[in-house]
Image: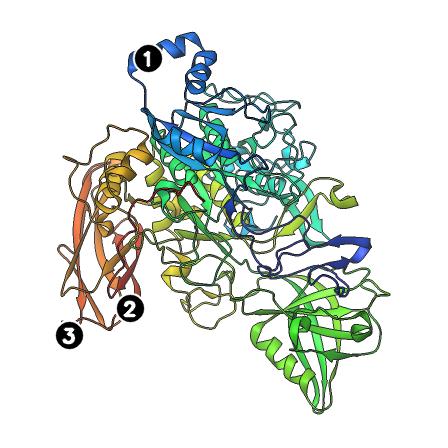
């Protein structure tokens, strides 16, 4: 789940645009701070890295075992005999019923996404089991971590509630998701939160396909499913820093009046799909908020089996890069086979190149962007020529800052950990301290006023502004400064959106010709629900940042699209969101989206197709569809038959006869090509989604925007669609302008667009790379890991 701890101020320090009120860091730990009101937190300066579940004292760990598909006759007999027959079949693969410690070996059984189970095994037992007939693949249990209002309005959705006649599903795009079920595979939920109550759902029961349940606790017509796959003995309560409640309320929270945090971002709150049902699958827990692969697999399995329409998965950081050894990619493939799209976090390891996560082409991968709202704070520096004013942001309470009346000395030290605000107490009293982010690639700074006797505040400022403040602090005569928090929330700020500094960037190392992330959605300083009375507070709303926060925005949009277009495949839904995304900000004159802390426009590796635009996605005109057969051809050509058998769960699956499909020829809405050769040919197929015969025929004309070093042509500059669901193909030719190979490693970013007589604009990012990397081959786990 992409960035985030719980409170608005409990944000990952390396990822946030804002942080809340704090006091000085102690000398014993670099990241512990004391927040206003006596609350302590431990900010995360660096995203936790994934790892394998450690072996226990007796040498056991959890393994996920994929079995070959049984014959139809055997499967029917087991289905007729019930769950016990499946359990007996799974048990037959294990060396005993219990481990040497007396623990049951068999943990979970899988029957929906694939046939298999999870069990406690030693390394040697796992290796022996992998050689048994009928065992397709074995995975050691990986541990992953979460990638951690106003944003629906920023997306162009209504911001209404109450008894107004306009407040109804009929006046919300996609009927507000009415009748749709969003599966939140996350950290649990606060069932008492107002966003999860069912006012307005009177007489609206879950759809007939719903087969889920609520375990331990009572649900309602809004919150219809509740399962704890992390600890089956307990209810799925959100004790993982509020992440689950935050993502669930972002995706589909009901209307709540007068929501705010610390008086900031006050207004009516709702999710993106407020009329949709919510099903919660808790897959993370523990003090460190661990998300085991076993729980993730259990959660996606249960969600698809229960009948959800979309899976919202704010998890990142694959333990392995190759998706045929990544349980999220495999489970998502099986969900795709059943018509369920998995929306996943692009990760918070940006802006480092190739830091994007969840790169399988059948997953919708979301990066994080800012919105045009600022929680304004002002830093005034006393200069010889007067006063220099720097605008920053802060989540501190505006009514109880407790700042001194007189300016305080600026302090910045580069020695050791002092640059990260690790000081002895006596050095920081009565000073304003400038701190670097504890993150190797982050170009932001934070400015902290520290005083152990008062309620304190943190202000986030830009990289360039922080450099100027550092110069003032390092001069021969240190300057003094003061902080002003009186402004509060400011709307309409710019440029917006921008690509969040922490958002994962491409290219993908495993699928270099599939552009990831796919698109951007709001993921910085998002106001949404938090568990009541968490951390000894009574906050019901808080602000968090991360690609975790971007994911539920898109999951809600998927529910709106699927409500309006129930026959659309997962690939068509993804295409509709990508080809209608916008790539300009709110400053006018067609200024492109920029990186959050950089002046230069964001490239395709940073923003994918651009920022999601729900109003246009409702009527995209055309779509790039991909069926299971094409995915299979893609896997075979680029990763081999072993990989196909793993992701499909069929040990008899064969690549012979499927045909050849180069990585760049997958019918993806974006295009990445290799400039190594004199010419590169890439083919795409578009499907007409206009069903009204009065609007047909519709003629589309082609246009390309590309750096002058690259020449792009198309075999037909016009496409003429006469009927709904008609498919037409085109071929791009990409080459250098002078016909000579470019410098190795050169990358050129652009786009091409099909624009119709009916007003549809279908835009695709285009990336040309000199010597595009080959996909990584299928790999297997080393049982000595």
| Residue 481 visible in image | yes
At a point 48% along the width and 41% down the height, the residue shown is 555
For disc 1, the neighbor class at 10 Å (few under 14, some 14 to 19, many from 20) is few
Q: Nearer the viewer, mark 1 or mark 3?
A: 1
Locate the C terminus and report the quarter of the image it occupies: top left
Q: Is residue 338 above or below residue 383?
A: above
Q: Position of residue 101 (x, y in %)?
A: 59, 27
- Whether residues under marks 2 and 3 lie with C-beta atoms below 8 angstroms apart, the answer is no
Report which quarter residue 111 is drawn in: top left
* Tag nearer the camera, 2 or 3: 2
Q: Which mark is residue 745?
A: 2
Q: Earlier in the sequence, mark 2 or mark 3?
A: 3
Residue 357: x %, y % from top left: 43, 51
Q: Nearer the viewer, residue 238 or 440?
A: 440
Tell me the number on the disc at residue 308: none
Q: SS for tag 3?
A: loop
Residue carrying label 1:
74
* SS state under label 2: loop
Residue 175 visible (yes or no): no
N-term mark: 1 or 3? 1
Q: Classify mark 2: residues with Cα within 10 Å, few (<14), some (14-19) or many (20+).
A: few
**Real-space Cα separation, disc 1 to disc 3, in angstroms:** 63 Å
Q: Which numbered mark, 1 or 2, is in the foreground of this view?
A: 1
Does 443 sit left or right of 742 as displayed?
Answer: right
Give how far across and how far down residue 584 sits, in percent: 42, 62
Q: Which residue is mark 3?
A: 738
- Label 3 Cα neighbours within 10 Å, binned few <14 / some 14-19 / many ≥20: few
Using the image, determine if residue 123 lies above or below residue 458: above
Most extreme residue toward the right is 453
């Amino acid at each position: 789940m992409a960035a985030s701890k719980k409170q608005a101020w409990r944000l990952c320090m390396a990822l946030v645009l804002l942080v809340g009120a704090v006091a000085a860091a102690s000398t014993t730990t670099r990241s512990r701070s004391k927040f206003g009101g006596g609350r302590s937190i431990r900010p995360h300066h660096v995203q936790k890295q994934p790892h394998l579940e450690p072996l226990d004292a007796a040498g056991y760990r959890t393994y996920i075992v994929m079995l070959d598909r049984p014959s139809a006759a055997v499967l029917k007999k087991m289905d007729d005999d019930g769950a016990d027959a499946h359990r007996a079949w799974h048990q037959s693969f294990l060396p005993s019923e219990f481990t040497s410690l007396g623990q049951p070996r068999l943990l979970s059984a899988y029957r929906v996404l694939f046939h298999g189970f999870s069990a406690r095994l030693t390394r040697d037992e796992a290796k022996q089991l992998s050689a048994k007939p009928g065992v397709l693949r074995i995975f050691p249990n990986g541990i992953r971590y979460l990638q951690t209002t106003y944003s629906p309005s920023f997306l162009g959705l209504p911001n209404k509630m109450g008894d107004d006649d306009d407040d109804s599903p009929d006046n919300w795009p996609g009927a507000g998701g009415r009748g749709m079920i969003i599966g939140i595979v996350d950290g649990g939920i606060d069932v008492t939160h107002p966003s999860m109550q069912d006012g307005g759902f009177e007489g609206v029961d879950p759809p007939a396909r719903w087969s889920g349940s609520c375990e331990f606790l009572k649900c309602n017509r809004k919150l219809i499913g509740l399962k704890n796959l992390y600890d089956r003995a307990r209810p799925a309560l959100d004790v993982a820093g509020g992440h689950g409640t935050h993502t669930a309320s972002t995706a589909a929270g009901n209307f709540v009046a007068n929501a705010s945090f610390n008086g900031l971002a006050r207004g009516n709150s709702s999710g993106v799909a407020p009329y949709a049902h919510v099903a919660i699958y808790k897959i993370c827990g523990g003090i460190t908020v661990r998300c085991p692969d076993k729980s993730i697999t259990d959660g996606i399995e249960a969600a698809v089996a229960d009948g959800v329409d979309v899976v919202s998965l704010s998890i990142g950081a694959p333990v392995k890069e190759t998706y045929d050894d990544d349980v999220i990619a495999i489970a998502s493939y099986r969900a795709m086979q059943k018509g369920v799209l998995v929306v996943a976090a692009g990760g918070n390891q940006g802006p480092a190149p190739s830091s994007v996560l969840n790169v399988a082409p059948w997953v919708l991968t979301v990066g994080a962007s800012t919105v045009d709202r600022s929680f304004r704070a002002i830093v005034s520096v006393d200069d010889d020529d007067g006063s220099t004013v720097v605008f920053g942001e802060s989540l501190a309470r505006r009514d109880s800052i407790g700042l001194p009346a007189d300016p305080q000395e600026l302090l910045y030290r580069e020695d050791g950990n002092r640059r990260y605000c690790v000081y002895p107490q006596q050095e920081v009293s009565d000073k304003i301290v400038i701190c670097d982010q504890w993150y190797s690639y982050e170009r932001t700074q934070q400015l902290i006023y520290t005083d152990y006797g008062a309620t304190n505040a943190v202000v986030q400022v830009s990289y360039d502004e922080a450099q100027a403040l550092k110069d003032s602090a390092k001069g021969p005569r240190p300057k003094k400064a003061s902080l002003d928090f009186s402004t509060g929330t400011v709307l309409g700020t710019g440029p917006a959106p921008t690509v969040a500094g922490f958002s994962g960037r491409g290219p993908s190392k495993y699928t270099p010709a599939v552009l990831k992330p796919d698109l951007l959605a709001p993921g910085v300083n998002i106001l949404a629900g938090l568990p009541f009375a968490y951390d000894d507070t009574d906050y019901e709303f808080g602000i968090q940042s991360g690609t975790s926060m971007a994911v539920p925005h898109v999951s809600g949009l998927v529910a709106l699209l699927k409500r309006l277009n129930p026959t659309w495949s997962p690939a068509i839904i993804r295409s509709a969101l990508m080809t209608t995304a916008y790539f300009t900000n709110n400053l006018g004159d067609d200024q492109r989206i920029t990186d959050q802390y950089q002046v230069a426009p964001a490239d395709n590796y940073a923003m994918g197709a651009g920022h999601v635009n729900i109003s246009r996605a409702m009527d995209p005109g055309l779509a790039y569809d991909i069926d299971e057969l094409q995915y299979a051809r893609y896997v075979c050509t680029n990763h081999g038959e072993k990989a196909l058998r793993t992701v499909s769960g069929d040990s008899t699956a064969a690549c012979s006869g499927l045909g050849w499909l180069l990585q760049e020829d997958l019918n993806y809405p974006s295009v990445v090509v290799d400039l190594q050769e004199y010419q590169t040919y890439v083919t795409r197929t578009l499907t007409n989604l206009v069903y009204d015969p009065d609007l047909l025929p519709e003629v589309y004309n082609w246009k390309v925007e590309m750096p002058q070093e690259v020449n792009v042509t198309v075999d037909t500059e016009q496409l003429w669609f006469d009927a709904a669901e008609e498919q037409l193909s085109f071929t791009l030719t990409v080459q250098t302008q002078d016909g000579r190979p470019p410098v190795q490693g050169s990358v050129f970013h652009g786009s091409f667009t099909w624009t119709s007589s009916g007003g549809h604009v279908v835009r695709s990012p285009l990336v040309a790379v000199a010597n595009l990397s080959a996909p990584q081959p299928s790999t297997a786990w080393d049982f000595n890991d």
